[in-house]
């Protein structure tokens, strides 16, 4: 499977993974689920769940560095700007052989179009925040978030996961 298949599947994920609300409890449940998954799998990741402008859950597991914190910030900025996943924007730019600087004039210091930040959409309200993971290869960061959202929303991850590479 290739770039175009991932673009289509990510768009489906973004349409299907919608929350009924995003409050402190919801963020705690999502962040805790991601943390548990990461600890059980021995992953060194930073996890951030936020409403735009308001951090609601944050953890940095053993083995992460300040660089992961910066990646989270830059990926979150992409979701806040475009209201879609950082991976989707990266795939779009890759399909055009561009960077976010070339396509939008945005600084690469502040925007990272690498997988791992996913929009948190609330039914009836739209995109209100993001959930971000940093520490794995970008496709794996993205998929960890999707897997956790599927589990939290009672969705079948097998039907929404990215195709095998």
Image (cartoon, rainbow, N blue to C red):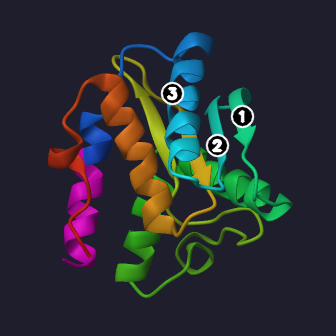
Q: Residues within 10 Å of mark 1 (few under 14, many from 20)?
A: some
Quadrant location of the C terminus in the rendered image: bottom left
Rendered image quadrant of residue 111: bottom right
Q: Position of residue 109 (x, y in %)?
A: 77, 69
Quadrant location of the N terminus in the rendered image: bottom left
Q: Main secondary structure of the magenta part?
A: helix
> Residue at horizontal 59%, vertical 43%?
39
Q: Residues within 10 Å of mark 3 (few under 14, many from 20)?
A: many
Is the Cβ of the residue at disc 1 closer than 8 Å to that at disc 2? yes
- In the rendered view, does 146 fall on the left or right side of 79? left
The residue beneath circle 2 is 47
- In the rendered view, does 72 fall on the left or right side of 3? right
Magenta stretch holds residue 28: no
Q: CA distance from mark 3 to mark 2?
A: 10 Å
In the figure, 16 relative to 1: above or below? above
Tag count in the figure?
Answer: 3
Please provide the residue range marked out in magenta: 1-12
Magenta stretch holds residue 8: yes
């Amino acid at each position: 499977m290739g770039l175009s298949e991932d673009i289509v599947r990510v768009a489906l994920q973004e349409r299907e993974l919608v929350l009924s609300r995003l409050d402190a409890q919801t963020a705690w449940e999502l962040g805790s689920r991601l943390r548990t998954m990461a600890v059980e799998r021995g992953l060194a990741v930073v996890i951030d769940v936020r409403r735009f402008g308001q951090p609601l859950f944050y953890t940095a597991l053993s083995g992460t560095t300040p660089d992961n914190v910066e990646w989270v910030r830059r990926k979150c900025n992409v979701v806040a700007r475009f209201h879609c996943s950082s991976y989707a924007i990266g795939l779009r730019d890759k399909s055009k052989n561009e960077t976010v600087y070339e396509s939008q004039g945005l600084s690469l210091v502040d925007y990272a179009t690498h997988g791992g930040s996913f929009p948190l959409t609330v039914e009836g309200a739209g995109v209100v925040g993001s959930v971000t993971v940093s520490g794995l290869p970008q496709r794996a960061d993205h998929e960890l978030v999707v897997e956790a959202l599927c589990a939290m929303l009672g969705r079948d991850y097998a039907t929404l996961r990215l195709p095998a590479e």
